[in-house]
Image: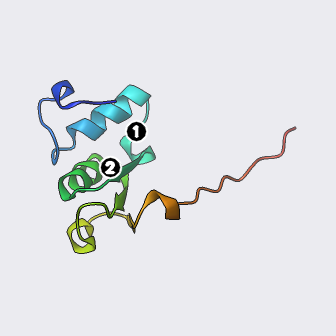
Amino acid sequence: MVCAEDVTYGKPHPAPFILAAKNLGLDPKNCIAFEDSPAGIKSAKDAGCFTIALLTSHKKSDLALADLILDSFSVLSIRKKMRPMS
């Protein structure tokens, strides 16, 4: 978790997402960010994350920068391909 107190610059600056990825030992380009605000989407995109916008408090047009826009988490499905065990 990254809080406002953890970074010098908050959203829409990319610092929160860059720090979160660093704390996970990941490159931001290998991260998915879920956001519901234009500032959050800009922050995540500028950090290099794939962004999923949730329509909770803003219009779709306000979140157009996102890679994917969803009405809610309930429409999200994650499918994982399993590799055969050797």
User: In this view, which residue lies farthest toward the right?
Assistant: 86
Q: Residues within 10 Å of mark 1 (few under 14, many from 20)?
A: some
In the image: residue 86, left or right of residue 23: right
**Residue identified by numbered label 2:** 48
- Closer to the camera in the image, 79 or 19: 79
User: Residue at coordinates 35% horizontally, 60% vertically from top-left?
Assistant: 54
Q: Which mark is residue 17?
A: none
Q: Are marks 1 and 2 in contact (CB under 8 Å)?
A: yes
In the image: residue 80, left or right of residue 72: right
Q: Earlier in the sequence, mark 1 or mark 2?
A: 1
**Residue identified by numbered label 1:** 27
User: Residue at coordinates 34% horizontally, 60% vertically from top-left?
Assistant: 53
Q: Amino acid at mark 1?
A: Asp
In the image: residue 9, left or right of residue 40: left
User: Residue at coordinates 18% horizontally, 53% vertically from top-left?
Assistant: 39
- Closer to the camera in the image, 72 or 53: 72
Q: Amino acid at mark 2?
A: Gly
Q: Is residue 26 above or below residue 49?
A: above
Label 1 to label 2, Cα distance in Å? 8 Å
User: In this view, which residue lies farthest toward the left?
Assistant: 8
User: Residue at coordinates 22% horizontally, 49% vertically from top-left?
Assistant: 43
Query: Where does the N terminus fall, quadrant-wise?
Result: top left
